[in-house]
Amino acid sequence: MADAVAPGDSAAARAGAFLTIDLGAVQANYRRLEQELGGVACAGAVKADAYGLGMGRVAPVLAAAGARCFFVALPDEGMALRQILAESVPDAEIFVLNGPMRGAEADYLAHDLIPVLNSLGDLDHWHAVAARESRPLAAVLHLDTGMSRLGLPRNELDVVAADHGRLEGLELRYVLSHLACADDAANPMNARQLEDFRTALARLPPAPASLANSSGIFLGADYHFDLGRPGAALYGVNPTPGQANPMRQVVRLQGKILQVREIDAPQAVGYGATHRVSRPTRLATVAVGYADGYLRSFSNQGIGRIGGVQVSVVGRVSMDLVTFDISAAPAESARPGATIDLLGPDLDVDELGRRGGTIGYEILTALGHRYHRAYLGG
Ligand SMILES: *Cc1c(COP(=O)(O)O)cnc(C)c1O
């Protein structure tokens, strides 16, 4: 890699690491998911700042690729998104997964946010808001078919099924449910949830339906209904673990080397002296740490790439620093100011997640705010 800092770019010169987000890859991933959906509409989950990648940059790119439906977790995220899309896609449908937060009704109405109704209590509440407004209000109804997290459980569905009047005054855009094990295609729970969802839909007035997240989209057309709701796959996480990743990597993270040291006598590395160097070794100290979302669980587990070779984290990750054994790297790449790839095309978020005892989702949403960010394409 050439020097990451162009002459005169002092913001890059000051940064400890460079985060490059490939919006063209996000767009390509959206198209790939659309293709898998075979004509069924494809939403974009952009909650948590588009999984840490920046909703302000990601959402317009999804909209340009044709997305009209967006899922956020919280009304604040929805309000920000409405503003982001106000000019380009004024008719975007913005769904708030965490439901109609009590006391925030005016904000939902003012910004045209559609709550996902997650309980009978939510349903009755939104019904009352519609009555007070004397107009039908859009809503999504969430049925729990196996997560035991949000959504109407069976006994609450029974109540609505026996009395469709409870839906009066509501314009049901979708009835949705969420799969617990979609990333494990062989898990019998998928078919069980599908069956329960179909049975539940038959007990409700006809409405469009949605079941599949990223992985669910790859379970086949039975799971597609009227809307796919991918998040992670848009951002490069493999929706089909155990098989080749059909998505393009979106994120590249390059940590800047602050110091290189040659060690020729036995020595310990880092807090707790958890790594001991016992033979001649070249170490690089990189300006990234757990305060940047470079997880402490990468201590003695993480890997990076420099000069075409894989290198390992040695010792504990500290708040602002991490140390790599770069003995195997070409000497000319091992100098202060050069970078080590911490995430990228040859080092994907899923692999790094495994090494940190977590998943790619958490690696992305943990990405810190001290990185020098650049966006490609879009
Ligand atoms: C976050 C979320 C999604 C997107 O899930 P991915 O696994 O990231 O594709 C879809 N539906 C619901 C209800 C969610 O909470």
Image (cartoon, rainbow, N blue to C red):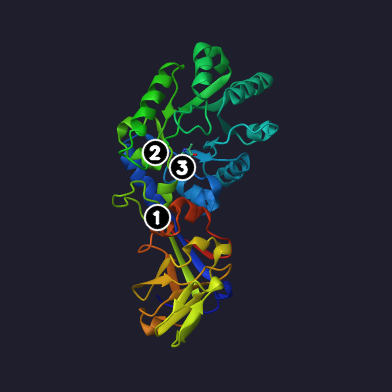
Which residue has dot 1 on it? 350
* In this rendering, the label closer to the viewer, 2 or 3: 2
Count neighbours of disc 1 (C-alpha within 10 A) and say few if under 14, some if 14 to 19, many if 20 or more: many
- SS at mark 1? helix
First along the sequence among labels 2 and 3: 3
Q: Which residue appears at 56% of the width and 68% of the height? A: 318
Residue in the foreground of this view, choosing between 176 and 136 = 176
First along the sequence among labels 1 and 3: 3
Which residue has dot 2 on it? 181
How many tags in the picture? 3
Look at the numbered disc 1 and say if its residue's Cβ is closer than 8 Å to ligand 1. no
* In this rendering, the label closer to the viewer, 1 or 3: 1
- SS at mark 3? strand
- Position in image of residue 12 (x %, y %): 54, 72
105 is higher (above) or lower (below) than 315: above
Which residue has dot 3 on it? 44
- Position in image of residue 182 (x %, y %): 37, 39
Marks 1 and 3 sit apart, C-alpha to C-alpha, by 20 Å
On the rendered structure, is 374 left or right of 196? right
The residue sitting at the right extreme is: 103
Marks 1 and 2 sit apart, C-alpha to C-alpha, by 17 Å
- Position in image of residue 130 (x %, y %): 63, 22
Q: Amino acid at mark 3?
A: Gly
Q: Amino acid at mark 2?
A: Cys
Count neighbours of disc 3 (C-alpha within 10 A) and say few if under 14, some if 14 to 19, many if 20 or more: many
